[in-house]
Image (cartoon, helix red, strand yellow):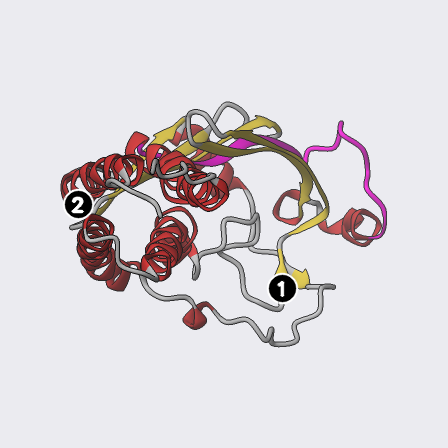
Amino acid sequence: MREGKPYAKLLLHAVQLVILFSLIQAVNSHIWYTGVVDVEYTDGLPKNSGMEVELEVDQDSADVSIHIDGFITFMQWQNTRNDTTIPSEESQEKSDFESGDIKPLSELQEEIPIMTKIAFVLALLLAGLAIFQLKYSWIVGLILSCFLLWICINLVILAPLGYVGGMDFGTDAFEDDNRESTVHSSTNSEVVFDIINGELEIEFTTESYDLGLVDESEFESVVREAPGKEHESYMALDGVAGIHYSPFVVELLWAWLVLFFLTPNAINVAYRVRVDKPQLL
């Protein structure tokens, strides 16, 4: 028979309790993530104007700050152009996916702190089962691992979606659904993901022709075919949209992988395959 306490498991559970207690404190007092959208017009009438929007989300708030560069240039562009639009060529069929299907950030700000406390209680229960070496403790361990993974999903995916789910950062964000004020739009983008620092960014370049700057005499020809970059209606912008997670969120992902998934499974396998020492007569 096997003798002694499972000290490896007990040490693991002690570390898990410390991690989860720290998680409760971090969720309550640290910023969860920072979202950034930064765009700058690089060509056309609004050249050298742009806007930077920064969003900071924690348990209690979602603070937005907006900084506008070249405000006078931007206003001159708006005052020069007219309100010409054309029917959109894109399908306007209602999507099966609605922003209302996404849980609001306010609800997640209430639920995630409660989840962290439940995870801590599960870890306490698991440690108690390990001390008394009761059977089927692995079931509680599996529940804890899955529950902590769900917390990670809420922090990494659902919390950002809960804020931006109903927003549209596209070039036609402020236009009627069935009309557009630009033609021959094209966008090139590149995704930059840094798993170590918890950063996800999309760098993009957009080119289009502003119908508000097109003379009435050449309107139909511009709509039919792009007139070239030398045309006064041509404009281009560079931008980046990204999300930067708090260090505790990144550390939580690594902790789940190492301390709540890989290590428990490795210890369980080691205990199962260990050969019992023969008893001396």
Identify the amino acid type marked 2: Ile
* Whether residue 232 is situated above or below residue 144 in the rendered picture: above
Comparing 248 with 200, the one in front is 248
User: Tag 2 or tag 1, which sits nearer the N-term?
Assistant: 2
The magenta segment is 224-246
Sort mark 2 into few (<14), some (14-19) or many (20+) by Cα contacts within 10 Å.
some
| Residue that carries the numbered disc 2 in the rendered image | 24
Residue at 41% in and 54% down = 164
Residue at 44% in and 57% down = 167
Residue 129, quarter of picture: bottom left
Residue 150: x percent and y percent? Answer: 38, 56
Residue 119, quarter of picture: bottom left
Specify whether 198 is left or right of 117: right
Mark number displayed over residue 179: 1
3D distance between C-alphas at marks 1 and 2: 48 Å
Instruction: Point out the image quarter for the C terminus.
Output: top left
Comparing 84 with 249, the one in front is 249
* Whether residue 41 is situated above or below residue 119 in the rendered picture: above
Residue 19: x percent and y percent? Answer: 23, 37
